[in-house]
Image (cartoon, rainbow, N blue to C red):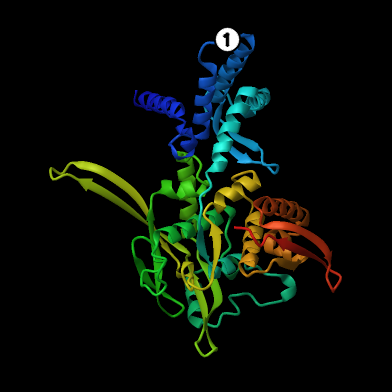
């Protein structure tokens, strides 16, 4: 009964909203794309028909509504390479029918999703989605980005990061963790989903922190203070962020509808990331007033995020529970804020959403995210023409596969990554030509006005 009442309330709200022209803000309401599509199809299928054409159209809308409600779990709308709406969908996994057991059903549903009534509604939703473009940018630590984009190129013939460590303390810490050398994660190597989470956390850190006074103690320290931890041989601030999993998942999905399954997925990604420790090594440079500089070598073996569960419950004076707010508290590694006043990279607030649309799917590849970040880093340094040997590019984007001699697969994912950064507007053009050594190199022409 409760679910029926909630559904009725949603439909009533939307009937009123459409009457007032308020459907332009549909994306901010707690309705999924599928819910909205079904409601608009209901609107198209209801009411009296004037002629036979309208009767057929209303019948098609009613049929589409039935098929989608019964057989489709979720629908997403993105933008294809030509700027047109593109639909991706998931079938129901429970109930009377399953797509895998009935191949004809998949064809029927595909035709349904491209029928006239559905196409009209999808276009309407797509137009409103495109208008929702958040303004502004957030800072992402350049040290963090550098560590994420590090890779090992065989021709450099460098010793492993562990073997080149200068700090015996860090070596002892790694050894005491009982981790085999072959299992040590050098620098910050992330999965695509973990990279998206890092982007979300950087944005939340920027939006919820004090960011106007770089000399302030609370500068980029999060929204609930900070912890002091040992980092680089000294006590330093580790920012803390408090938020609900719903808020983080909303960012992760680029502002789209969030389901319970989405929240569980983000929770799992966070948990797995918090269980990893990374071997970091980089140099922080500070310029002196007399023109000289100070260089501080940072070597650490740490988590980049830590998780603390927090529950807040409000009681009345009669000891009656009034509300309960479940929050997640994340402790960020100091690298998220170290020198962020002077060494940072600006990202658009909607970078996740833009990347999802440009790629055509939520399932972004590692190669795409790494190429995106590498080119944004180059733009940040005002390098509008960026060159790299093709072999190096392949190792940058897919080191693991290159070591496994899966070059064909690497080229496939590189081509997709190139298509995506062009769709994002970061890359204007590129060409492959011989370097001075005769090896092929890639010359990227970047969009200096991209933002």
Point out residue 150 in the picture as x, y percentages from the top left corner.
Answer: 62, 68
Does 110 appear above or below 291? above
In this view, the residue in front, 315 or 172, is: 315
Left or right, 386 with respect to 261, comes to right
Does 383 appear above or below 267? below
Q: Which residue is outermost to the bottom?
A: 290
In this view, the residue in front, 94 or 47, is: 47
Q: Can residue 341 be seen in this view?
A: yes
Q: Quadrant of the N terminus?
A: top left
Q: How many numbered marks does the figure carry?
A: 1
Point out residue 337 in the picture as x, y percentages from the top left corner.
Answer: 46, 69
Point out residue 151 in the picture as x, y percentages from the top left corner.
Answer: 65, 67
According to the image, label 1 marks what residue? 50
Q: Is mark 1 on a helix, strand or loop?
A: loop
Q: Quadrant of the C terminus?
A: bottom right
Q: Which residue is outermost to the front?
A: 20
Q: Image point 42% across, 48% down: which residue? A: 247
Does 35 appear above or below 229? above
Q: Which residue is outermost to the left?
A: 318
Q: Image point 28% across, 50% down: which residue? A: 312
In this view, the residue in front, 39 or 310, is: 39
In this view, the residue in front, 388 or 181, is: 388
Does 435 appear above or below 129? below
Q: Image point 64% across, 37% down: which residue? A: 86
Q: Is residue 186 visible?
A: no
Point out residue 439 in the picture as x, y percentages from the top left corner.
Answer: 84, 68
Q: Which residue is outermost to the right?
A: 438
Q: How crowded is mark 1: few (under 14 residues within 10 Å), some or many (20 or more)?
A: few
């Amino acid at each position: 009964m409760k679910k029926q009442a909630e559904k009725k309330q949603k439909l009533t709200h939307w009937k009123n909203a459409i009457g007032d022209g308020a459907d332009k803000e549909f994306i901010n309401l707690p309705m999924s794309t599928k819910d909205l599509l079904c409601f608009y199809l209901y609107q198209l299928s209801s009411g009296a028909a004037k002629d036979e054409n309208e009767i057929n159209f209303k019948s098609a809308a009613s049929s589409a509504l039935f098929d989608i409600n019964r057989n489709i779990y979720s629908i997403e709308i993105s933008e294809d390479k030509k700027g047109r709406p593109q639909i991706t969908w998931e079938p129901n996994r429970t109930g009377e029918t399953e797509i895998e057991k009935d191949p004809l059903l998949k064809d029927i549903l595909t035709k349904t999703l491209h029928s006239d009534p559905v196409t009209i509604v999808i276009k309407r939703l797509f137009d409103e989605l495109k208008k929702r473009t958040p303004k502004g940018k957030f800072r992402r630590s350049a040290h963090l980005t550098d560590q994420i984009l590090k890779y090992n190129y065989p021709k450099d013939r460098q010793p492993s990061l562990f073997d080149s460590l200068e700090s015996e303390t860090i070596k002892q810490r790694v050894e005491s963790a009982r981790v085999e050398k072959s299992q040590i994660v050098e620098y910050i190597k992330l999965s695509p989903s973990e990279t998206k989470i890092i982007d979300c956390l950087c944005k939340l850190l920027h939006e919820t922190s004090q960011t106007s006074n770089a000399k302030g103690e609370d500068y980029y320290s999060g929204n609930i203070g900070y912890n002091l931890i040992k980092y680089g041989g000294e006590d330093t601030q580790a920012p803390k962020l408090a938020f609900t999993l719903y808020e983080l998942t909303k960012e992760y999905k680029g502002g789209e509808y969030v389901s319970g399954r989405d929240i569980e997925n983000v929770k799992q990604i966070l948990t797995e990331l918090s269980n990893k420790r990374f071997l970091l090594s980089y140099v922080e440079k500070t310029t002196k007033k007399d023109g000289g500089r100070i260089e501080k070598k940072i070597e650490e073996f740490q988590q980049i995020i830590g998780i603390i569960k927090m529950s807040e419950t409000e009681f009345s004076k009669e000891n009656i529970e009034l509300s309960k707010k479940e929050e997640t508290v994340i402790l960020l590694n100091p690298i998220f804020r170290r020198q962020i006043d002077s060494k940072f990279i600006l990202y658009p607030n909607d970078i996740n959403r833009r990347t999802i649309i440009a790629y055509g799917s939520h399932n972004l590849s590692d190669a795409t995210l790494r190429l995106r970040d590498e080119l944004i880093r180059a733009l940040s340094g005002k390098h509008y023409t960026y060159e790299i040997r093709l072999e190096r590019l392949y190792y940058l984007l897919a080191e693991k596969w290159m070591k496994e001699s899966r070059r064909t697969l690497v080229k496939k994912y590189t081509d997709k990554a190139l298509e995506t950064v062009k769709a994002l507007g970061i890359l204007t053009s590129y060409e492959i030509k011989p370097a001075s050594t005769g090896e092929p190199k890639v010359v990227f022409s970047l969009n200096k006005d991209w933002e």
